């Protein structure tokens, strides 16, 4: 069943610049999908359109539809979309640096609307990211880049999402850490049944864990398919996998 679908979505910045030019894509329930592309291709714009976080005075959806669980969501506010189970981990992590990991998690908790207790969700998050538990007394600003990325994902998990959207979680991290974090994201996807839409420039890492992938260039989806098949595609190998 389709959890998220975009149909011919066009987004303009400052009334003129078309950042995405008719993007259609789908995330099936329970699946992990990668959206790949170079710097400036339109990946972040696509995610912001889905979560409702386009800068209101600059970006506008010109046409197209975004459906989540069969419902048109473009007229909903970002918090309403989060309540439906759609959470966006922005590029650059955006954690609360002056708060501890626990306090960061608490800030994301739904409160009375939640199905599980905060303690239960916190423990679940620390099971996936045991390193964070070791840093429980530190302010988040003192955590390493990898730990901050882990905290950003843990915080998303506390909202009890159906779909987690991740914008470049590999950014600035050493390859070994990218591998570790991507493996945990895949585990969350498989164990919790949470669907994932993963935006990445690091095509190698993303294609190793995703089920399905889309390639975006200059605001257009130019290729899509099973991740394992795309990995073998000569054009993808040449331009996105470093010839490997
Ligand atoms: P990156 O990895 O650099 O974030 P991206 O694939 O996510 O790249 P977008 O951030 O979606 O790309 O940007 C797509 C295009 O829209 C780029 O040309 C960018 O300069 C432009 N753009 C992005 N945000 C804005 C904005 N707030 N106002 C004007 N133009 C913008």
Image (cartoon, grey):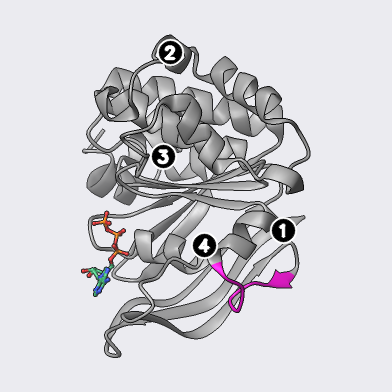
Q: Earlier in the sequence, mark 1 or mark 2?
A: 1
Q: Secondary structure at mark 2?
A: helix
Depth check, mark 3 against mark 2: the one in front is 2
- Percent x, y of residue 183: 49, 23
Q: Is the CB–ligand 1 distance for label 1 below 8 Å?
A: no
Q: What residue is pinned by disc 4?
A: 51
Residue 149's place in the image compared with 38, above or below, is above
Q: Which mark is residue 131?
A: 2
Does residue 118 appear in the picture of this structure? yes
State which quarter of the image contains the C terminus: top left
Decide: marks 3, 4 in contact (CB < 8 A)?
A: no
Q: Which mark is residue 232?
A: 3
- For the residues marked 3 and 4, what is the alpha-carbon distance in whole angstroms? 32 Å
Residue 100's place in the image compared with 67, above or below, is above
- Percent x, y of residue 235: 31, 51
Q: Earlier in the sequence, mark 3 or mark 2?
A: 2
Q: Which residues are magenta?
A: 71-77
- Percent x, y of residue 22: 45, 78
Q: Residues within 10 Å of mark 4 (few under 14, many from 20)?
A: many
Depth check, mark 3 against mark 1: the one in front is 1
Q: Residues within 10 Å of mark 2 (few under 14, many from 20)?
A: some
Q: Which mark is residue 2?
A: 1
Figure quadrant, ligand 1:
bottom left
Q: Earlier in the sequence, mark 1 or mark 4?
A: 1
- For the residues marked 4 and 2, what is the alpha-carbon distance in whole angstroms? 29 Å
State which quarter of the image contains the N terminus: bottom right
Q: Residue at 44% x, 38% y: name it.
A: 207
Residue 195's place in the image compared with 37, above or below, is above
Q: Residue at 75% x, 48% y: name it.
A: 113
């Amino acid at each position: 069943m389709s959890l998220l679908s975009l149909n011919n979505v066009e987004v303009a910045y400052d009334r003129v610049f078309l950042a995405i030019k008719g993007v259609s894509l789908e995330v099936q329930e329970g699946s992990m999908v990668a959206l790949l592309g170079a710097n400036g291709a339109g990946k972040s714009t696509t995610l912001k359109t889905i979560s409702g976080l386009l800068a209101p005075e600059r970006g506008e959806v010109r046409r197209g539809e975004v459906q989540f669980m069969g419902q048109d969501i473009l007229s909903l506010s970002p918090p309403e979309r989060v309540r439906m189970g759609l959470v966006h981990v922005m590029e650059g992590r955006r954690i609360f640096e002056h708060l501890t990991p626990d306090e960061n998690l608490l800030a994301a908790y739904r409160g009375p609307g939640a199905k599980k207790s905060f303690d239960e969700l916190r423990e679940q998050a620390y099971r996936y990211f045991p390193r964070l538990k070791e840093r429980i007394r530190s302010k988040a600003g003192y955590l390493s880049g990898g730990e901050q990325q882990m905290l950003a994902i843990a915080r998303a998990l506390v909202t009890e999402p159906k779909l987690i959207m991740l914008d470049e979680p590999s950014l600035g991290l050493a390859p070994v850490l990218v591998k570790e974090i991507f493996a945990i994201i895949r585990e969350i996807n498989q164990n919790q049944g949470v669907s994932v839409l993963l935006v990445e420039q690091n095509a190698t890492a993303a294609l190793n864990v995703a089920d399905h992938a889309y390639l975006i260039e200059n605001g257009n989806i130019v290729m899509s398919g099973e991740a394992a098949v795309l990995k073998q595609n000569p054009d993808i190998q040449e331009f996105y996998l470093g010839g490997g």
